[in-house]
Image (spheres, coloured by chain):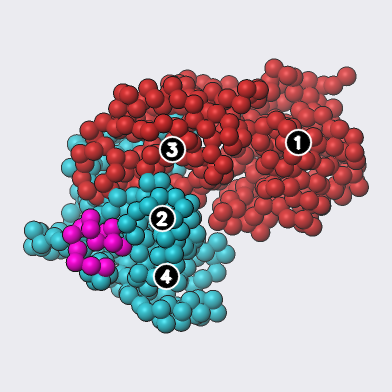
């Protein structure tokens, strides 16, 4: 068991890949935004890559352990300290009952992942332990952690003293510019050539009005093909309007003139076009980008994106880890 | 237009969108729902889940188990085996949903958007202008005159995508530019040719002009009307919006809070597609 002394800004329980199977009832996948970091945190402590762990956003939590266990913190650097001593990221550490993990504001990246040997043992809702706090689904009581809560943990020995080699960690941008891969489609044919070129050449600023449901982008205007203009009235009159359809997770949803990347807790359907989609292997960049930072987009093929996802899966495994001396 | 063969396009590394036509009608919705069912019962390897809407089906697949091109081939062959929908006869529940049209909460939300985000015509007035109606009362009469078909669920837990079954009540509206960051729980909205009910306070892009006090999704699975489901509605249900006054709205809201409200559901009717088509044909030309 772990006591939540201070929940941080918005710390949630997430598992990977999250909640599959309810897209047709409007339930998002949820899960960690940076699954690269979360999966590595899990394998460091000896867990399967997808078991439930904590995602801390911008400002990390303070946790008091009521058991001897093994933990790892990966992702954003929130200056984690164990009983006041700096705790190295990307390594697994033995902790003893009574010790306190304290994290503060992120100095690089946006989201940190705390894995505990065995994983968190909150109730499974619709096949997943992930939290979808906007609708009160999953996690503990449907929301982010609160002070005073006790997190149940599945008993496990854990593997202390493991480390992720530098080369296997995600490379956070040091320039505040993130180069994010996108696949064309489903509705790229609604955007004209000039609009497509603008999309790929522009610097898109991540708006402060962004959260786990959507990342709003600020940038140039969009222009459209005749398909977007001359269409039956039931689409809706504006060029970005389309007869409501399913949204892929990661879709760059063009709502009017405002692109919104539909991230882990995003809507499953709606009536705007999705010219491009961020593939799963690039999601970690969204998870670590901070409001005000720049996203620039690079095209990748569907098969190229699938290969990246498979490579990442390979990388997020025990074989990647080294034993510390 | 209904396409001979679905149009496929990729959505990143794990999704395919199949589009069956370029309009909103019952036949297209039967194709989308029929494809979802047929794909599921085919047990095609690597299909994780699918989400049908008015005229399309989004398929989520596992690329380590099936490739993009192979899945399209599978879907096209399943599509070829779908039967016609014009002889269908199916059970269809009818829900009466109390709505306070032109309610103060939606009006306040729209006013807030107009002040802070973008100036626009208030939503009811915009729908009046777009559809050549007389005034907002005309909108209320027309919108509440038709039964609505639950074409699918999505966007947010429990949210129904609805289509007016009476062609005389078909209204259209542009969607917000940019979308609202908030919408009152229970708001009734129109976007394109679709009507919807917002299950909880969420961002939104439809024009809003009414509000229902009754819950349409229930994370606790405790409300009897949901019959063990998380969502009040299922595809193939019908909804009738019943205009209520503020006084009635407050009364129902209090009953909902007390746990004594009973949703009005009629469960003895079949929906006969050929009869509907014949009636529709008779009415043709009678649109607003």
Distance from label 2 to label 4 (Cα)? 15 Å
Residue positioned 19% across, 63% down in the render: B133
For label 1, the residue is A78
Residue positioned 44% across, 50% down in the render: B117
Q: Residues within 10 Å of mark 3 (few under 14, many from 20)?
A: many
Q: Where is residue B226 in the image (x, y as percent from the top left)?
A: 46, 67
Q: Where is residue A301 in the image (x, y as percent from the top left)?
A: 43, 21
Colour in which chain A is shown? red
Colour in which chain B is shown? cyan
Decide which of A128, B260 is in the foreground and name it: B260
Quadrant showing the N terminus of chain B:
top left
Distance from label 1 to label 2 (Cα)? 39 Å
Which is in the foreground here, disc 1 or disc 2? Answer: 2
Q: Position of residue B87 (x, y in %)?
A: 18, 56
Q: Are marks 1 and 3 on the same chain?
A: yes
Residue B217 image label: none
Range of magenta residues: B124-136
Point out the tag, 2 or 4, that comes first from the N-terminus.
4
- Callout 1: chain: A
Residue A259 image label: 3
Q: Is mark 2 on a helix, strand or loop?
A: helix
For label 4, the residue is B104
- Callout 3: chain: A
Distance from label 3 to label 4 (Cα)? 30 Å
For label 2, the residue is B114
Q: Are marks 1 and 2 on the same chain?
A: no
Q: Position of residue A271 (x, y in %)?
A: 35, 46
Q: Is A32 situated above or below A146? A: above
Q: Do labels 3 and 4 share a chain?
A: no
Distance from label 1 to label 4 (Cα)? 45 Å
Q: How crowded is mark 1: few (under 14 residues within 10 Å), some or many (20 or more)?
A: many
- Callout 2: chain: B
């Amino acid at each position: 068991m772990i006591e939540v002394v201070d929940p941080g800004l918005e710390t949630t329980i997430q598992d990977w890949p999250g909640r599959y199977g309810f897209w047709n009832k409007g339930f998002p996948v949820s899960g960690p935004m940076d699954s690269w970091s979360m999966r590595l945190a899990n394998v460091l402590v000896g867990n399967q890559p997808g078991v439930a762990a904590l995602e801390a956003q911008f400002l990390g939590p303070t946790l008091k352990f009521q058991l001897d266990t093994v933990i790892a913190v990966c992702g954003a650097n929130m200056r984690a300290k164990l009983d006041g001593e700096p705790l190295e990221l990307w390594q697994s550490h033995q902790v003893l009952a009574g010790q306190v993990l304290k994290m503060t504001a992120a100095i690089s990246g946006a989201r940190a992942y705390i894995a505990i040997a065995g994983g968190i043992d909150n109730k499974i809702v619709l096949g997943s332990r992930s939290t979808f706090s906007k609708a009160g689904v999953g996690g503990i009581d449907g929301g982010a952690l609160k002070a005073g809560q006790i997190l149940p943990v599945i008993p496990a020995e854990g593997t202390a003293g493991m480390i992720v080699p530098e080369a296997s960690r995600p490379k956070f941008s040091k320039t505040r510019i993130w180069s994010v891969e996108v696949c064309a489609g489903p509705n790229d044919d609604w955007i004209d050539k000039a609009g497509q070129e603008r999309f790929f050449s522009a610097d898109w600023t991540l708006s402060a009005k962004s959260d786990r449901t959507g990342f709003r982008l600020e940038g140039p205007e969009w222009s459209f093909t005749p398909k977007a203009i001359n269409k039956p009235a039931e689409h809706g009159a504006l060029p970005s309007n389309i007869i409501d359809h399913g949204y892929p997770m990661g879709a760059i949803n063009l709502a009017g003139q405002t692109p919104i990347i539909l991230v882990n807790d995003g809507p499953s359907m709606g009536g705007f076009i999705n010219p491009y989609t961020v593939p799963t292997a690039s999601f970690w960049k969204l998870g670590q980008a901070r409001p005000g930072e720049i996203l620039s987009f690079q095209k990748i093929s569907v098969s190229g994106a699938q290969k990246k996802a498979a490579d990442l899966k390979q990388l997020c495994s025990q074989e990647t880890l080294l034993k510390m001396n | 237009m209904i396409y001979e063969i679905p149009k496929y396009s990729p959505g990143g590394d794990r999704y395919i969108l199949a589009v069956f036509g370029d309009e909103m009608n019952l036949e297209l919705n039967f194709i989308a729902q029929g494809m979802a069912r047929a794909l599921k019962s085919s047990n095609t390897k690597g299909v994780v889940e699918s989400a049908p809407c008015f005229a399309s089906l989004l398929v989520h697949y596992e690329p380590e188990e099936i490739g993009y091109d192979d899945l399209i081939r599978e879907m096209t062959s399943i599509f070829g085996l779908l039967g016609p929908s014009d002889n269908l006869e199916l059970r269809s529940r009818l829900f009466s949903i109390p709505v306070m049209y032109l309610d103060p909460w939606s009006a306040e939300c729209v006013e807030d958007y107009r002040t802070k985000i973008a100036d626009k015509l208030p939503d009811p007035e915009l729908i009046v202008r777009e559809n050549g109606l007389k005034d907002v009362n005309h909108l209320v009469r027309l919108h509440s005159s038709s039964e609505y078909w639950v074409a699918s669920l999505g966007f947010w837990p429990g949210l129904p995508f609805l289509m007016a079954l009476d062609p005389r009540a078909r209204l259209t509206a542009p969607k917000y530019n940019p979308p609202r960051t908030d919408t009152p729980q229970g708001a009734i909205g129109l976007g394109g040719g679709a009507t919807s009910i917002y299950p909880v306070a969420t961002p939104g892009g439809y024009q809003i002009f009414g509000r229902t006090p009754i819950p349409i999704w229930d994370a606790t699975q405790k409300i009897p009307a949901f019959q063990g489901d998380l969502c009040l509605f299922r595809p193939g249900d019908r909804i009738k919006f019943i205009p209520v006054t503020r006084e009635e709205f407050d009364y129902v809201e209090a009953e909902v809070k007390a746990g004594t409200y009973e949703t009005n559901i009629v469960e003895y009717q079949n929906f006969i597609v050929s009869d509907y088509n014949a009636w529709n044909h008779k009415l043709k030309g009678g649109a607003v």
